[in-house]
């Protein structure tokens, strides 16, 4: 039995096919994905404070603090990072857990 592999050719959009709504939707999706990625990295940092989780938080936060971030949204990257960190701390920070007790600082 032969297996058929279908390879679709990529097609570039013509200039008249690109809309403002599509560009704004894509930019919003990029920011939302960056928020989700940072949120997961920060949850891991709270659960397991080690070099790997600190590094992940630092790497995921770099986008928010870069000049490129301004091209995607009018939001302030530092403000958004603080909002996400605050949300994660409220939802996932458990002071009774011995590994997390008293630790609220962030590597970023």
Image: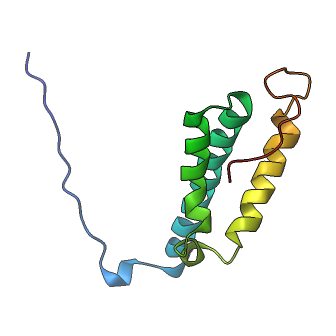
State whether residue 104 appears in this view.
yes
Q: Considering the image in quadrants, where does the C terminus appear?
A: bottom right
Q: Nearer the viewer, residue 36 or 44?
A: 44
Give x and y (percent) for residue 74: 67, 78
Question: Left or right: where does residue 56 sit relative to residue 11?
Answer: right
Identify the residue at the far right of this view. Answer: 96
Give x and y (percent) for residue 12: 26, 69
The quadrant holding residue 21 is bottom right
State whether residue 29 appears in this view.
no
The quadrant holding residue 4 is top left
The quadrant holding residue 66 is bottom right
Give x and y (percent) for residue 59: 54, 51
Q: Considering the image in quadrants, where does the N terminus appear?
A: top left
Question: Left or right: where does residue 49 sit relative to residue 105?
Answer: left
Whether residue 45 is situated above or below residue 27 in the rendered picture: above
Q: Nearer the viewer, residue 58 or 93?
A: 58
Whether residue 104 is situated above or below residue 13 in the rendered picture: above
């Amino acid at each position: 039995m032969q297996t058929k592999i279908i390879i679709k050719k990529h097609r570039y959009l013509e200039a008249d096919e690109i809309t403002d709504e599509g560009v704004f939707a894509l930019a919003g999706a990029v920011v939302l994905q960056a928020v989700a990625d940072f949120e997961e990295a920060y949850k891991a940092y709270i659960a397991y404070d080690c070099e790997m989780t600190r590094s992940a938080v630092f790497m995921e936060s770099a986008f928010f603090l870069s000049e490129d971030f301004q091209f995607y949204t009018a939001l302030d990257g530092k403000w958004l990072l603080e909002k996400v960190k605050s949300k994660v701390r409220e939802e996932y920070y458990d002071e009774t857990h011995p590994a997390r007790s008293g630790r609220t600082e962030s590597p970023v």
